[in-house]
Image (cartoon, helix red, strand yellow):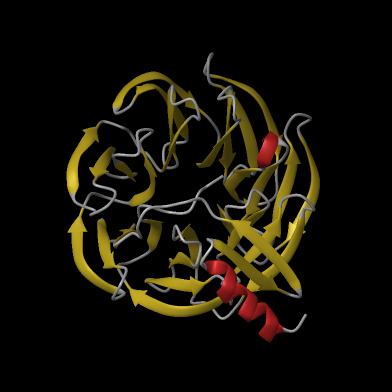
Amino acid sequence: MQKSNLYRRFIALTSFGIAFIFFQNHVVFAQLPAQTGLPKVAIVLNSADASISLVDMASHKVTKTIPVGKEPHHLMMTPDQKTLLVANAAGNDVVLLNPITGDAEGRIAKIIDPYQIGYSPNHRWFVANGNRLNRVDIYTADGLDLKLAKSIHLAKTPSHIAFTSDSRIAFITLQDSNELVAIDLESQTVIWRMPTGKVPAGLWMTPGDQYLFIGITGSDYVEVVDWKNQREIKRIPTGNGAHNFRPLGDKKHVFVSNRVASTISLVNMQTLEKVGDINGLPSGPDDMEITPDGKNLWVTFRFAKKIGIIDIPTMKLIDVIPVGKSPHGVFFYPRASWE
């Protein structure tokens, strides 16, 4: 099939909410969930500026820059999908934002050194990684009501988090100890640890809790871990500085940002193979988000002080927007499914 025919097919199918990706002669189809409306505001965390940038998604212009606290790195939604949490690692608190407008609605004080944060799938637990203080804090959670259950002191630089679907285990990468740690959430104890590649960062659990993917930022690959047997089974080369993940939404493919190579790769989670690369990007691609129609991938470029928009059907960068220093997290609502 010629590319022109593929393009005509895409135009016909998008009205039914189906997108395709043409990647090194591979065609990937993703059935997108129904969404009402498109997001209007993108929220960008400027980690080195202690601020967030609000970007009008229609005009691609920054409309407002708001101080939020020292080193806002990661973010996530509350289980009820009503509040966006922004973790201020050096500010020792979590800021509450309106997920649609980006307006500040309050903060949770005395969440110490929250670099990466996450609710367990059953919403009973809230985990905060203390990247600077080498500890993981586990809270019992009832929405925004968080009560510290235990602080677990680990080795160097707890980074990213992943959970089993039954909420029994939280996995933590230790960037400067080159380890993966498994924590039992009920007992708040470390049940095992295993060595990884150099500077492990982003974590992603593949469908069915089959494998853990680890972005090996100190090298150029995604490490595939059989976590039930605590062993590496494969390395998927992606690019220097393999770092973070964002699933496409078809339960088959996941994007990988390669911070040093300044590329983004697409990996098939079933075959454990790289499908292709997005090249020609500004330096330091990091966190990613996908619009609910599945058409655009928004990505922060930490070294370039910009955020970029990639057209998913063509896998081409279509615009870049200057923001603050060291932009890390990016968010808008609604967004494409993370399943």
Task: State left or right for residue 209 relative to residue 44.
Answer: right
Quadrant where the image shows the N terminus: bottom right
Residue 94 in the image: state x and y as whole percent. Answer: 28, 39
Task: State left or right for residue 222 relative to residue 301.
Answer: right
Q: Residue at x 29, y 40 (%)?
A: 83
Along the line of sight, the residue nearer the viewer: 313 or 73 = 313
Q: Is residue 80 visible?
A: yes
Q: Residue at x 33, y 33 (%)?
A: 112
Along the line of sight, the residue nearer the viewer: 76 or 173 = 76
Q: Is residue 327 above or below residue 262?
A: above
Along the line of sight, the residue nearer the viewer: 73 or 144 = 144
Quadrant where the image shows the C terminus: top right
Q: Residue at x 32, y 51 (%)?
A: 71
Residue 328 in the image: state x and y as whole percent. Answer: 40, 58
Residue 176 in the image: state x and y as whole percent. Answer: 57, 46
The image shows a total of numbered marks equal to 0
Q: Is residue 260 visible?
A: no
Residue 133 in the image: state x and y as whole percent. Answer: 42, 37
Q: Is residue 235 above or below residue 9?
A: above
Task: State left or right for residue 40 relative to residue 161.
Answer: left
Q: Residue at x 27, y 52 (%)?
A: 100
Task: State left or right for residue 35 relative to residue 9.
Answer: left
